[in-house]
Amino acid sequence: MGIFYIFLFLIFLLIIVPILTGLFFLYLAKMGLDILDFSSLNAILLLLLAAIGSFVNIPLGKKGMVQVTESRFFGFSRRIVWRPQGISINVGGALLPLLIAGYFLLQVPIEPLLITTAVVTFFAFLGARFVKEKGILISLALPVLFSSFFAILLAPEYATQVAFSSGVLGVLIGADLIHLPWILRKNGGVMVIGGAGIFDGIFLVGIISALLTAI
């Protein structure tokens, strides 16, 4: 019986925990989109697009194809895939949040957004590190806290929009773009921006920052 319970526990760790973790973050993302004044239907559609887009990488130029080990779902899942050498952008993890941030750029005061983005970029740069076979890993705490704090301080009427946009742009610039040449050298010439999909730091920092402004 002891072996049976150990087996059930291992199944729980390997299957149930990742599923529950994923559902929890999807719930957070839904709440964040609601706070950003998207209707429930539009929020669900955006999450559906982001989930599907997590499996789509758009090459921004390529030289050839190489095999790389891809880590997904917080490291619970790994697989060997073919990737184009050069830079690609993930639809769910980078392109969609960038489009949402671009939509808010037309609505918020530009100066508070630029200041907040600069602060988030700095701390995202400091907190980012490259891990072989995982890509860029970033501590979410400081970018989230500073994007929320400065958004509330500098643009209280547009705090959620500024927090989301500065979080997305700051992590994209500070964690990915500034490190881009170094990552391409270290990672066999392969770089996928937002490669973890909706669980990527670009998407999560924007969503959690927006949530914090509503607390």
Image (cartoon, rainbow, N blue to C red):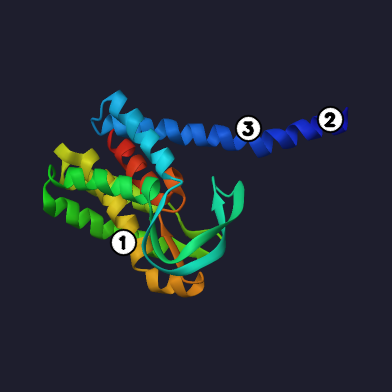
Residue denoted by label 3? 16
Q: Looking at the image, which residue sits at the far top?
A: 40
- In the rendered image, residue 69, in percent from the top left (x then y), is placed at 58, 59
Say which element carries label 1: helix
* Image x and y of residue 3, in percent: 86, 33
Local secondary structure at mark 2: helix
Identity of the amino acid at label 3? Ile
Categorize mark 1 by other alpha carbons within 10 Å: few (<14), some (14-19), many (20+). Answer: many
Q: Which mark is residue 4?
A: 2
Q: Quadrant of the C terminus?
A: top left
Image position of 18 (left or right of 48)? right
- Indicate the amino acid at tag 1: Ile
Packing grade of label 3 (10 A; few <14, some 14-19, many >=20) is few
User: Do callouts 1 and 3 mark residues in contact (Cβ within 8 Å)?
Assistant: no
**Residue 169 location, quadrant:** bottom left
Mark seen at residue 83 = none
**Distance between the alpha carbons at the discs numbered 1 and 2:** 49 Å
Tell me how far mark 3 sits from mark 2, CA to CA: 17 Å
- Give the mark, 1 or 2, whose residue is nearer the N terminus: 2
State the residue position of label 1. Answer: 173
Q: Is residue 151 left or right of residue 179?
A: left
Image quarter in which the N terminus is found: top right
Which circle's residue, 1 or 3, is located before the other in the chain? 3
- Distance of mark 1 from mark 3, alpha carbons? 34 Å
Please report whichever mark, 3 or 2, sits nearer to the chain's N-terminal start: 2
Residue drawn at x 34%, y 40% as measured from the top left: 207
Across and down, in percent, residue 101 comes to 24, 46
User: Image point 28% across, 44% down: which residue?
Assistant: 164
Q: Secondary structure at mark 3?
A: helix
Q: Visible in this render: residue 215?
A: no
